[in-house]
Image: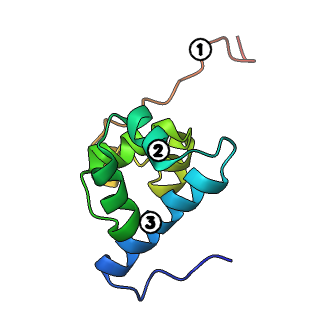
Amino acid sequence: MTENLKFKSDTEIAKILGQRIKAARLNGAKPMTSEQLATAAGLSRQSLSTFENSGRGKISSLIAIMRALDLLGSLGEMVPDFSGPSPMELLHQPKSKKRVRSGTSKNE
């Protein structure tokens, strides 16, 4: 069941994220101990434990944990890619010229 995070505090959302990371570690495709995941992510076991219990930590730690759990594909769902041109950039782009047909008219 998906939780509605809209009305949760930042602290509550961080804690939920940590709980989900822990669940992925224990119940994922390749279950791991906290020591195994910490080693695979290049973190101390204490840093991983803090992240799992409170959601507090560096964004680089989250990326390393997700990489070690093979969850980087989930980032696309977490943060959609909006890297295309902005509406203002589109507005200021030069308009393309319309092509004019050349040829003979029927009267010639």
What label sits on residue 27 in the rendered view?
A: none
Q: Secondary structure at mark 1?
A: loop
Classed neighbour count for the residue bearing mark 1: other residues with Cα under 10 Å, few (<14), some (14–19), many (≥20):
few
Which numbered disc, 1 or 2, marks the residue closer to the eye?
Answer: 2
x%, y% of residue 97? 43, 29
Work out whether mark 2 precedes mark 3 in sequence or the reverse, and give the earlier one: 3
Residue that label 2 marks = 66
Of the residues shown, which amino acid type is indicated by label 2?
A: Met
Q: Nearer the viewer, residue 73 or 51?
A: 51
Residue that label 3 marks = 17
The residue lying at 51 percent from left, 59 percent from top is: 22
Q: Residue 40: which quarter of the image?
A: top left
Q: Nearer the viewer, residue 57 or 2?
A: 57
Q: Is residue 8 above or below residue 13?
A: below
Q: Is residue 107 above or below residue 63?
A: above
Of the residues shown, which amino acid type is indicated by label 1?
A: Ser
Scheme of colours in the image: rainbow
Q: Horizontally, is 94 left or right of 26 in the view? A: left
The residue lying at 67 percent from left, 11 percent from top is: 104
x%, y% of residue 96? 42, 32
- CA–CA distance in space, label 3 to label 1: 63 Å
What label sits on residue 102 in the rendered view?
A: 1
Of the residues shown, which amino acid type is indicated by label 3?
A: Leu
Q: Horizontally, is 29 left or right of 6 in the view? A: right
Work out whether mark 1 precedes mark 2 in sequence or the reverse, and give the earlier one: 2
Quarter of the image with the C terminus is top right
Classed neighbour count for the residue bearing mark 2: other residues with Cα under 10 Å, few (<14), some (14–19), many (≥20):
many
Classed neighbour count for the residue bearing mark 3: other residues with Cα under 10 Å, few (<14), some (14–19), many (≥20):
some
